[in-house]
Image (cartoon, rainbow, N blue to C red):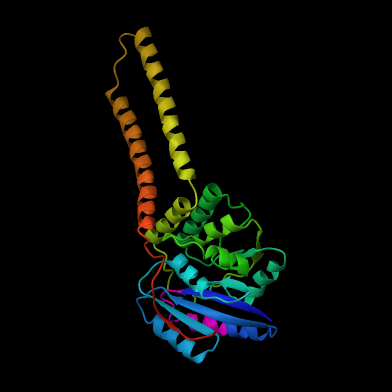
Amino acid sequence: MRIISFVIPCYRSYNTISDVVAEIDRTMSAHENDDYEIILVNDCSPDNTIDVLKNLAENNSHVMAIDMAKNFGQHAALLAGIRHTTGDIVVCLDDDGQTPPSEAYNLIDKLAEFDVCYASYEGKKHSAFRNFGSSVNDKMLEIMLDKPKTLYASSYFAMKRYIADEIVKYTNPYPYIMGLVLRTTNSITSAPVNHKERASGRSGYSISKLLSLWINGFTAFSVKPLRIASLMGILCAVIGGIFSIWAVINKLTNPAAPIGWTTLIIVLLIIGGMILFVLGMLGEYVGRMYISMNNSPQYVIKAKYGHYR
């Protein structure tokens, strides 16, 4: 008998998570040949989400609840949940009901041929801001991590046990799940899933959290930003050289040509901005190396509730 492990990071979901768990129960009851477990990870939600999770763990033998000591972010919460799974297949989904558990087998069935399957949506029900952030993140993954253009990096996905075992080996304090998946396997596909309207509340992703997610993605798993910065420096140097030659020739052929103070300031601002950008990028990498060397934790678990296994 297979075991399907559902991992759900929870934040401000006290109104929605009970319905998500109930939908998982209904879905799995229709697949009697598969057993299942549900790992709920409270990412230090400021509301009473943990009380709801504790109640679910106490009254549902399939549920385990994990309470984080502080807010470590969605990807750290996912890793914490994945480390507590025992299933042959791990399914990760959201706590707001927009990623329907009833369609989990659309993803699971694809694992007969592939290692990982992501949900794809014809029409997303997120806000315009969240959709914009997702599109930027998707493009960043294509450029920095060589994600296939046809693959959408959604938060609803299923993976085989050996993939889960491999990605939890990552112990640095800046986890990024899609980056871990992409560096583990090329056997990735997608399957169509309906995206539902959010039942209540609003997305926990703010501008700062989205920026942090993007930075995690391209500094933790790629050196391409450093190469791009080097190319931009070379480009500025070439442009500066060409401009210098033009200025000399222009002065020789036209002695009355005025020396452009405005042009000089513009060039200085451009070059100065480039230098600060490259220094900032280097500082980001060095700072993250320093934090990793200090063994900063990915997450800290405050308590666990329920004992499925």
Please say whether residue 308 is visible from this viewpoint: yes
Q: How far across and down, in percent of the image, does residue 283 sit?
A: 35, 46
Q: Does the magenta stretch include residue 12?
A: yes
Can you say whether 195 is above or below 281 in the image? below
> Based on the displayed image, in which of its 4 quarters is residue 69 positioned?
bottom left
Span of residues in magenta: 10-23
Q: Is residue 255 magenta?
A: no
Nearest the eye: 270 or 132? 270
Residue ranking furthest to the right? 113
> Based on the displayed image, in which of its 4 quarters is residue 182 positioned?
bottom right
Task: Name the residue rendered at 49%, 82% in the picture.
Answer: 64
Q: How far across and down, in percent of the image, does residue 5 sit?
A: 58, 76
Task: Name the residue rendered at 38%, 40% in the picture.
Answer: 278
Nearest the eye: 124 or 104? 104
Q: How far across and down, in percent of the image, does residue 106 sit?
A: 67, 71
Query: Which quarter of the image is occupied by the C terminus?
Result: bottom right
Nearest the eye: 78 or 162? 162
Task: Name the residue rendered at 36%, 16% in the picture.
Answer: 247
Residue ranking furthest to the bottom? 59
Can you say whether 48 is above or below 213 in the image? below
Q: How far across and down, in percent of the image, does residue 180 sit?
A: 53, 59
Query: Which quarter of the image is occupied by the N terminus?
Result: bottom right
Please say whether residue 200 is visible from this viewpoint: no
Task: Name the residue rendered at 36%, 79% in the picture.
Answer: 47
> Based on the displayed image, in which of its 4 quarters is residue 259 positioned?
top left
